[in-house]
Image (tube, rainbow, N blue to C red):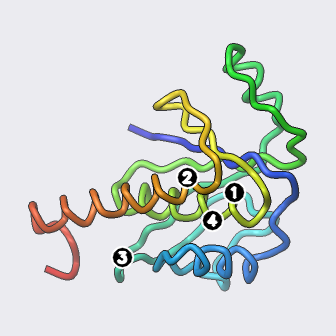
């Protein structure tokens, strides 16, 4: 099952180096693969987390895609750039949440989690991402699914 998260930003992320710096500033160990990064931040964003592929899909969408679909939610704003993140695996979930939280923090934004139907401040999204990563690490240890063993 594919899941999604959205970063609603006051400004667009300038480039891969800034995205990586934002991720690093949050204390996450996600590494974007700048060499394989698609143009204009559209498509699969390759990333590595704990020596595992943790890439996810990302695209810029119009805010109206959210406001038309989720009519009861007040997204506030103004948001000049909305990034949609799509993921299906546990490592991709970790990667996407690390990236969406860092993106919101770097660009004065908020995060929308449609699975939970909630808006998160950048700080709350960072906490949520840390909790998500910790749960995935715990599952990996419990089921020995990580490449680390």
Q: Callout 2: helix, strand or loop?
A: helix
Q: Are marks 1 and 4 in contact (CB under 8 Å)?
A: yes
Determine the CA span between mark 1 and mark 4: 5 Å
- Residue denoted by label 2: 125
For label 2, the crowd category at 10 Å Cα-Cα, with few meaning under 14, some 14 to 19 and many 20 or more, is: many
- Residue denoted by label 1: 104
Q: Quadrant of residue 22?
A: bottom right
Image point (83%, 37%), residue name: 62
Determine the CA span between mark 2 and mark 1: 8 Å
Q: Are marks 2 and 1 in contact (CB under 8 Å)?
A: yes
Dot placed on the residue nearer the N-terminal end, 2 or 4: 4
Q: Quadrant of residue 69?
A: top right
- Residue denoted by label 4: 102
Give the mark toward the camera: 2 or 3.
Answer: 2
Please state which of residues 146 and 19 is positioned toward the viewer in this rendering: 19
Image point (65%, 79%), residue name: 20
Q: Where residue 110 sits: x, y (%)?
A: 69, 47
Determine the CA span between mark 3 and mark 4: 19 Å
Image point (51%, 77%), residue name: 27
């Amino acid at each position: 099952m594919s899941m999604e998260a959205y970063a609603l930003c006051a400004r667009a992320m300038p480039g891969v180096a800034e995205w990586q710096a934002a991720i690093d500033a949050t204390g996450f160990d996600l590494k974007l693969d700048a060499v394989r990064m698609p143009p204009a931040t559209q498509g699969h964003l390759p990333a590595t987390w704990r020596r595992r592929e943790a890439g996810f899909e990302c695209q810029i969408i119009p805010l109206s895609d959210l406001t038309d679909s989720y009519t009861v939610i007040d997204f506030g704003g103004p948001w000049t750039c909305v990034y949609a993140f799509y993921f299906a695996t546990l490592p991709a979930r970790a990667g996407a949440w690390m990236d969406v939280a860092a993106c919101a923090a770097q660009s004065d934004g908020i995060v929308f989690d449609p699975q939970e139907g909630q808006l998160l401040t950048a700080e709350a999204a960072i906490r949520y991402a840390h909790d998500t990563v910790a749960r995935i690490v715990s599952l990996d240890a419990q089921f020995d699914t990580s490449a680390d063993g």
